[in-house]
Image (spheres, rainbow, N blue to C red):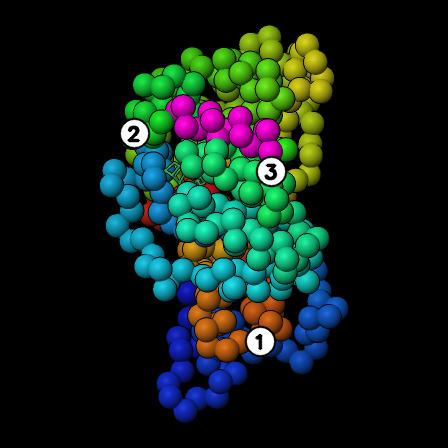
Amino acid sequence: MSSLLPVFGGKQGRGAGRELEARAASGAPQTPVWFDLDAPPPLADVQGRRYEYLRLSVTDRCDLACRYCMPPGGEGDHALRPELMSFEENARLVAIFARLGVRRVRFTGGEPLIRKHFTSLVQAIHDASEATELVLTSNATRLAPVARELRAAGLSGVNVSLDSLDPQRFREITRGGDLGAVLAGIEASLDAGLEVKINTVAMGGINDDEFGAIVDWAWARGITPRFIELMPLGEGAKMTEAFMGVPDIVHRLGERVADDAMGPVVTGRGPARYFASAADSSRRVGVIAAVSANFCDTCNRVRVTGRGDLRVCLASQRAISVRDAFRAGASDRDVAWATCWALGGKAQGHQFATDGGAHEGVGMSLVGG
Ligand code: SAM
Ligand code: SF4
């Protein structure tokens, strides 16, 4: 369920001015006269963090149901087709964000490749904002046949979720996934010239005996592996006994990583920290301390859900509706202002430990993980 900030208490009735209606639809206060979209202020918040990275969810549906993410049979509240942002709306949104300084867009979901004609969306966004880097996060089950056309449409990289190299274990974790199709998707992406990373959710007692093998497998193909701490969101909140912190994850990698592994390479692109291989410093393994090390201080991302809710934080329900603003006739300038306004007041960090469990109702596939 969407929870928009009720600045004006929702849409205005018949007869209200179009401009007021559009503004109310986004949930933001009136655009101030000084706000100039040709010379906008940096997209930043009161903590001084700047936002240059958009995670754009294109669907909340998925063909898998990973144990830490999706309930069996899917979430109960999937968006209907008309509720989703259209390709035109997404392209318009990215063009506005580009004017605000956003340089990188990651398509996510749910599973983005479930969305019909996804390649056309990539192409439309690439055409609308050529300077914006476009990347994808995918489970890769449907990637092999489209990897080449996605590259041609303007996609430059893909992060593939891969929690096990054992077909039976993979099937159990994903509730039915076909490891062969995923590996074919990875190979096809490499052949197509996409930069490939793999993301593995670290789960004690479930896949921690495979971390070393996953790293070796990835490095042998020129792929950067990354391990993510299990987050207590949605289904993940039911698996807290499997949580593993970064020191335990790095420990499992043994001698693969250099002795000075605790001095990680910082790339500045996101919350991942990278450790170099002991044997070859050009090889890296990433760890994402999503829970234990609060990376909120350096957060540089903004999220838009498939329904067009702009979420300032993964773990927060604070949102404005870009979709409703577009559909009520908002100008690009009004949407840009609403975005600056929503982000400006963002809280300092997630409150996993202190929010009384409110984040547990925010499933990753619904927000766009
Ligand atoms: N379906 C695509 C995929 O799996 O890559 C994109 C969406 S998925 C929600 C994005 C990322 O969120 C995946 O890497 C997945 O492993 C991660 N994820 C989902 N639930 C998580 C949780 N509770 N803790 C940590 N990572 C999680
Ligand atoms: Fe689907 Fe990705 Fe969630 Fe797995 S992690 S259920 S692939 S959305």
* Residue 94 makes an appearance in the image: yes
Where's residue 197, x and y in %? 57, 30
Residue farthest bottom in this picture: 15
The residue sitting at 60% across, 72% down in the picture is 332
Prevalent SS, magenta region: helix
Q: Is residue 257 above or below residue 2?
A: above
The earlier-in-sequence mark between 3 and 1 is: 3
Q: Closer to the N terminus: mark 3 or mark 2?
A: 3
Position of residue 328 in the picture relative to residue 79 (left or right): right
Asked whether residue 188 is drawn in magenta, I would say yes
Q: Is residue 56 magenta?
A: no
Q: Residue at x 52, y 64 (%)?
A: 88
Q: Give the CA distance from mark 3 to mark 2.
A: 26 Å
Note whether 61 is above or below 221 in the view shown: below
Mark 3 Cβ and ligand 1 under 8 Å apart: no
Which amino acid type is marked by label 2? Answer: Gly
Circle 1 crowding by C-alpha within 10 Å: few under 14, some 14–19, many from 20: some
The span picked out in magenta is 179-192
Left or right position of 130 against 109: right
Residue type at the position of mark 1: Ser
3 or 1: mark nearer the eye: 3
Q: What's the residue at 56%, 38% (across, down)?
A: 148
Marking on residue 331: 1
**Residue, x 68% and y 62% (percent of image)?**
99
Whole-percent x, y for residue 314 in the image: 47, 48
Which residue is under mark 3? 157
Lower position in the chain sequence, tag 1 or tag 2: 2
Q: Is residue 344 above or below residue 355?
A: below
**Residue for badge 2:** 176
Tag in front: 1 or 2: 2
Q: Amino acid at mark 3?
A: Gly
